[in-house]
Image: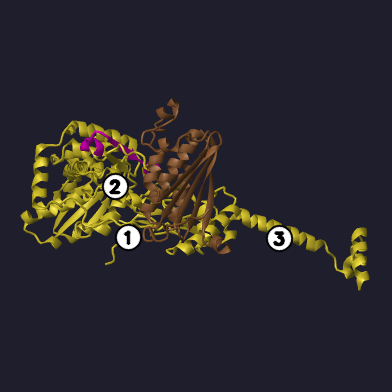
């Protein structure tokens, strides 16, 4: 395990529910980190978009949460965890246009029901788990362009 | 001759080593070391923000002077439309006439080329709408070279969004060489083509991509005084402009958009505003916008770092001029010219070269090494005070941390950390100073210490 910690980046970014002015900051920091690491720009964009959508979900629906970024030689792993009301039906939430966002949020131009479908489009791996009135965890994995497929059976954390 | 990579340079004598410029640079390309600012050339996008910021005028643009005209038999001026906004009481007719008076044999307006560029952009968007590659929206104009460079460095994933149509100053030179030069029956080297520029970025762009097209670039700020003199002293017979208000309007923010006329467009000016907008686009927003005009200078090209008139005043001037010369629709002769040029060469308006990504922000080319450096960087960031004072010569605490990781700076460059270490040292000195050697102990005459030294001596 010590080897692993030496060759990985692990960063955590807190996200506050309902704080729209600060929404997107975690995704922006994730993006800057990936740029510093010299990650391919298209992959960086995919990770940024998926992270942004996950962050927005926390801002819109949850009380608070955090986004964890892990980068290691196998790939990029994003984990968005929150404390909140949870998702009653995940398969329904995956449908484009399905949204439970309140009217006031939609008026701001958010909550169009594209968040999770967008994440699915961007990520190579996606795992969503949710408990009602406790919270949701969205875990995403991204492989490097050349190493896609080969290294893809298991993921850390 | 090696093409100059940058036109923004330092005047070391004038630099006082203040940190105003490093804080304003959108790509964190300036550091202060040894009491003088210096520019990290690979990061500089020639936006001119530092020229605007520096109170000591220690940043300047390398450009050509009017003496360069002497080398040529036939001298051509390509005036940027922003030139027309520099003279409050003069119309383009007189300004063009003054350029002739100054020694130019021909004036080929960049405003006119902007109208042709308008056609080319419209065509590109229409063609793009026919494809199903909608994931790339919004398309972004590459008319401002600063924006193109900014995207290369900070937003490389948006390179496919850039419309590969040449900016008007390049097109103006191309058009002149294609259309006018053959008529002149002069060899190319006898003809001097000079762009009259509102900003340093266009000089750099021409140095890098347009050396064969343009023989020199003269800042508006340099030519202004001479033109003003001519306009003031001489009675000039007016020379009517080639362009309509559509092309002139390009000099102000929103003018390009107004010319291109699509349903879902957006105009943004000011480099920091552009950075914020590109961040949003990279997050997958603004998909419903077809076209974005982005001008790095406030108020558009009229706000260029090499202009004279206040950008707000100049913007109003341009709007009035555009209305006066007609800006509702492109003149039919422009559309005819566009067809003629593209029929001969369908890629006439398209960039000659692919614009590459310049990912200079990465810490290391090797991922494992980059990861190691990033972890070191985060550790250093945690130690730094986070007040971004700039006294270390790097723009932010984070950038100092990066400089340290890259062996370009050290932790004690931070004055807060240096003071902390000094304080520790001073306290240690104080402690050391209070310890008396046995031989001195009784000489001080102070009871406690005497006892102490007696105590230690008793060990002997």
Distance between mark 1 and mark 2 Cα atoms: 24 Å
Q: Does B131 appear above or below B188?
A: above
Seen at 19% across and 37% down, the residue is B246
Determine which residue is flagged by label 2.
B161
Q: Which residue is mark 1?
A: B5
Q: Are marks 2 and 3 on the same chain?
A: yes
Where the N terminus of chain B falls, by quadrant? Answer: bottom left
In front: label 1 or label 2: 2
Say whether disc 3 or disc 1 marks the residue closer to the N-terminus: 1
Question: Which residue is pictured at 39% across the width and 33% down the height?
Answer: A98
Magenta region, residue range: B256-278
Q: Is residue B328 magenta?
A: no
Q: Up-down: is B312 above or below A155?
A: above
Residue B228: percent from left, percent from top: 25, 43
SS of the residue under disc 1: loop
Can you give x and y, in whole percent of width and height, for residue A12 in the image?
Answer: 54, 48
Q: How much space separates mark 3 and mark 1, taking CA atoms? A: 46 Å
């Amino acid at each position: 395990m010590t080897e692993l910690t030496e060759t990985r980046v692990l960063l955590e970014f807190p996200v506050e529910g309902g704080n729209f002015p600060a929404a997107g900051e975690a995704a922006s920091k994730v993006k800057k980190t990936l740029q510093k690491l010299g990650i391919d720009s298209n992959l960086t964009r995919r990770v940024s978009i998926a992270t942004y959508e996950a962050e927005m979900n926390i801002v819109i629906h949850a009380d608070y949460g955090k986004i964890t970024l892990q980068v290691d030689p196998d790939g990029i792993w994003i984990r968005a965890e929150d404390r909140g009301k949870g998702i009653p039906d995940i398969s329904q939430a995956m449908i484009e246009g399905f949204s439970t966002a309140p009217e006031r949020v939609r008026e701001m131009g958010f909550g169009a029901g594209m968040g999770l479908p967008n994440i699915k489009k961007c990520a190579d791996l996606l795992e969503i788990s949710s408990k009602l009135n406790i919270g949701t965890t969205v875990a995403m994995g991204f492989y490097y362009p050349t190493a896609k497929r080969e290294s893809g059976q298991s993921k850390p954390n | 001759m090696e093409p100059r990579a940058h036109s923004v340079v330092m005047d070391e004598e004038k630099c006082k080593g203040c940190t105003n410029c490093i804080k304003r640079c959108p790509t964190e390309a300036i550091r202060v070391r040894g009491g003088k600012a210096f520019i990290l050339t690979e990061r500089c996008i020639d936006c001119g923000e530092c020229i605007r910021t520096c109170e000591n005028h220690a940043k300047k643009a390398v450009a050509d002077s009017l003496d360069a005209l002497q080398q040529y038999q036939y001298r051509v001026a390509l005036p940027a439309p922003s030139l027309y906004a520099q003279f409050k009481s003069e119309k383009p007719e007189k300004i063009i006439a003054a350029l002739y008076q100054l020694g130019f044999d021909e004036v080929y307006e960049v405003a006119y080329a902007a109208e042709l560029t308008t056609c080319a952009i419209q065509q590109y968007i229409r063609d793009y709408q026919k494809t199903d590659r909608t994931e790339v929206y919004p398309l972004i104009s590459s008319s401002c070279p600063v924006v193109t460079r900014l995207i290369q460095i900070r937003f490389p994933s948006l390179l496919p969004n850039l419309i590969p149509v040449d900016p008007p100053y390049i097109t103006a030179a191309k058009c002149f060489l294609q259309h006018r030069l053959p008529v002149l029956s002069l060899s190319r080297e006898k003809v001097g083509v000079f762009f009259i520029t509102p900003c340093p970025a266009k000089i750099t762009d021409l140095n890098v991509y347009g050396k064969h097209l343009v023989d020199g670039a003269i800042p508006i700020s340099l030519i202004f005084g001479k033109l003003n003199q001519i306009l003031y002293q001489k009675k000039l017979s007016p020379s009517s402009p080639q362009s309509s208000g559509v092309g002139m309007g390009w000099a102000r923010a929103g003018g390009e958009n107004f010319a291109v006329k699509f349903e879902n467009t957006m105009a943004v000016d000011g480099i920091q505003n552009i950075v914020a907008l590109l961040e949003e686009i990279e997050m997958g927003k603004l998909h419903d916008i077809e076209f974005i005009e982005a001008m790095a200078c406030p108020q558009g090209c009229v706000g260029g770092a090499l202009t004279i008139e206040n950008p707000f005043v100049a913007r109003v001037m341009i709007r009035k001029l555009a209305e006066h010369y007609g800006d509702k629709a492109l003149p039919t002769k422009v559309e005819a010219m566009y067809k003629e040029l593209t029929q001969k060469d369908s890629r006439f308006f398209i960039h000659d070269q692919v614009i590459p990504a310049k990912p200079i922000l990465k810490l290391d080319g090797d991922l494992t090494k980059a990861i190691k450096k990033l972890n070191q960087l985060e550790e250093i960031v945690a130690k730094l005070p986070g007040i971004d004072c700039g006294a270390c010569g790097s723009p932010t605490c984070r950038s100092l941390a990066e400089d340290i990781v890259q062996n370009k700076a050290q932790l004690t460059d931070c004055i807060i950390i240096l003071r902390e270490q000094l304080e520790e040292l001073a306290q240690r000195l104080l402690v050391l100073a209070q310890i008396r050697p046995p031989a001195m102990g009784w000489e001080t005459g102070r009871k406690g210490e005497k006892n102490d030294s007696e105590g230690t001596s008793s060990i002997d």
